[in-house]
Image: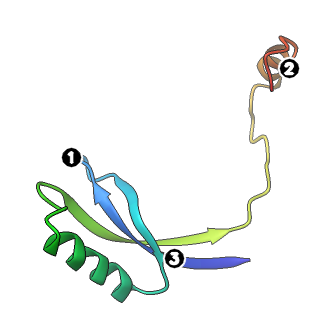
């Protein structure tokens, strides 16, 4: 499964994105959302970008996780 979504993303001072409006099926949806935000005065002092997000299935893999530490944490009984 692979899905592409388009989001209006608010950029912080470092250029990191926070998805704020979407998903949209294309960039035009993001541009319309940006226009509406601007016309409603909700974009004051904020910087936005279009984020193209590709969703794919994920398989959990350890990739060198500290198994000893994980076992110790799981044995505490604090895990829900």
The Cα–Cα distance between marks 1 and 3, rounded to whole angstroms, is: 24 Å
In this figure, which residue is indicated by the disc labeled 2?
Answer: 71
Viewer-side residue, 68 vs 10: 10
Label 3's element? strand
Q: Position of residue 19 (x, y in %)?
A: 41, 60
Q: Residue at x 79, y 49 (%)?
A: 60
Circle 3 crowding by C-alpha within 10 Å: few under 14, some 14–19, many from 20: some
Q: Quadrant of the N terminus?
A: bottom right
Counting residues from the N terminus, which is met first, the one under dot 1 or under dot 2?
A: 1
For the residues carrying marks 3 and 2, which lies nearer the camera in this image?
3
Q: Residues within 10 Å of mark 2 (few under 14, many from 20)?
A: few
Q: Which residue is mark 1?
A: 13
Quadrant in the picture for residue 39: bottom left
Residue 57 picture location, percent across and down: 73, 66
**Label 1 to label 2, Cα distance in Å?**
39 Å
Give the image quarter of residue 64: top right
Q: Considering the numbered disc 2 on the image, is that residue within a helix, a strand or a loop?
A: helix
User: Residue 61 versus residue 45: which sits nearer the camera?
Assistant: 45
Q: Residue at x 62, y 78 (%)?
A: 3
**Quadrant assignment for the C terminus:** top right
x, y percentage for residue 41? 13, 65
Asked which secondary structure carries label 1, the reply is loop
* First in sequence: mark 3 vs mark 2: 3
Res. 5 mark: 3
In the image, what residue occupies the spot 86% across and 20% down? 71
**Along the line of sight, which residue is nearer the eye, 62 or 3?**
3
């Amino acid at each position: 499964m692979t899905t592409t979504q388009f989001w209006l993303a608010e950029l912080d001072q470092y250029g990191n994105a926070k998805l704020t409006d979407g998903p949209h099926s294309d960039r035009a949806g993001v541009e319309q959302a940006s226009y509406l935000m601007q016309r409603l005065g909700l974009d004051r002092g904020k910087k936005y970008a279009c984020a193209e997000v590709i969703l794919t299935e994920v398989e959990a893999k350890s990739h060198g996780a500290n198994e000893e530490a994980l076992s110790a944490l799981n044995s505490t009984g604090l895990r829900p």
